[in-house]
């Protein structure tokens, strides 16, 4: 699993990650999950690393999926979360086996974004939701983030909200842009 996107970087910064990253926007995530037309009992936090985003949610059984074993260890040890080592482009779950998935502040790090969307479409049951919280590269702060991540050697590939919504539609989701700005939320409801 090493060599996938920016995994090596996250392995190195794992002990500091939760100290330097702001908390996830639980209201934006909950608003995204509210678009599901089925109850959300089982949720995957794809690229969830230390589980920072899932601490902003309450209710469903949450499993963090990440390629960084060091970040997953932090999710298990410091947050008591279930964690599975995995590639977002080859999720180790059965068809229709979860009610929802989130990808929070991580989509731009995924080396095969199209495969990640297709895999989410495969594992999310009809009526479930994929909630992606990302940074808009067309926003002035977004342009600065893109430049800074590239300057430190990350292979980040950011998508604007409308382009991401189009990608979700192509994979069989009914997409909605929940909010816009430097950070934005796009939701796809599985048809």
Image: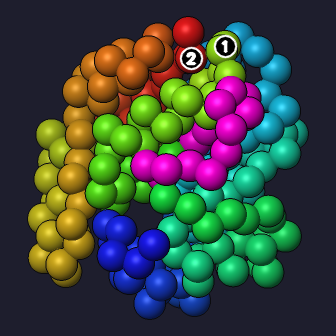
Which badge, 1 or 2, is on the more N-terminal residue? 1
The reply to whether residue 134 is in sight is no
Residue under numbered circle 2: 190
The span from disc 1 to disc 2 (Cα, nearest Å) is 5 Å
User: Range of the magenta residues?
Assistant: 88-102
- Residue 173's x, y, as percent? 47, 16
Foreground: 13 or 121?
A: 121
Q: Residue at x 77, y 74 (%)?
A: 76
**Image position of 81 (left or right of 110):** right
Indicate the quadrant where residue 124 lies: top right
Other-residue count near label 2 (Cα within 10 Å), few / some / many at <14 / 14–19 / ≥20: many
- Residue 165's x, y, as percent? 33, 22
Q: Are marks 1 and 2 in contact (CB under 8 Å)?
A: yes
- Residue 72's x, y, as percent? 64, 73
Magenta region, main secondary structure: loop
Foreground: 22 or 127?
A: 127
Q: Residue at x 65, y 31 (%)?
A: 95
Residue under numbered circle 1: 127
- Residue 144's x, y, as percent? 16, 60
Quadrant for the C terminus in the image: top right
Indicate the quadrant where residue 97 lies: top right
**Image position of 190 (left or right of 139):** right
């Amino acid at each position: 699993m090493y060599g996938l996107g920016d995994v090596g970087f996250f392995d190195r910064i794992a002990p500091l990650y939760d100290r330097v990253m702001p908390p996830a926007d639980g209201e934006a995530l909950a608003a995204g999950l509210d678009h599901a037309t089925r109850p959300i009992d089982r949720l995957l936090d794809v690229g969830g690393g230390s589980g920072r985003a899932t601490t902003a949610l309450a209710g469903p059984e949450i499993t963090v999926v990440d390629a960084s074993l060091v970040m997953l260890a932090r999710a298990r040890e410091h947050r008591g979360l279930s964690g599975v080592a995995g590639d977002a482009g080859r999720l180790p779950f059965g068809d229709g086996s979860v009610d929802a998935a989130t990808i929070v502040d991580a989509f731009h790090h995924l080396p095969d974004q199209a495969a990640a969307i297709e895999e989410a479409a495969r594992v999310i049951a009809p009526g479930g939701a994929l909630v992606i919280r990302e940074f808009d590269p067309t926003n002035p702060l977004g342009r600065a983030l893109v430049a800074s991540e590239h300057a430190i050697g990350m292979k980040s590939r950011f998508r604007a909200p409308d382009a991401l919504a189009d990608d979700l539609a192509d994979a069989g989701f009914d997409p909605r842009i929940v909010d816009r700005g430097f950070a934005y939320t796009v939701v796809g409801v599985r048809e």
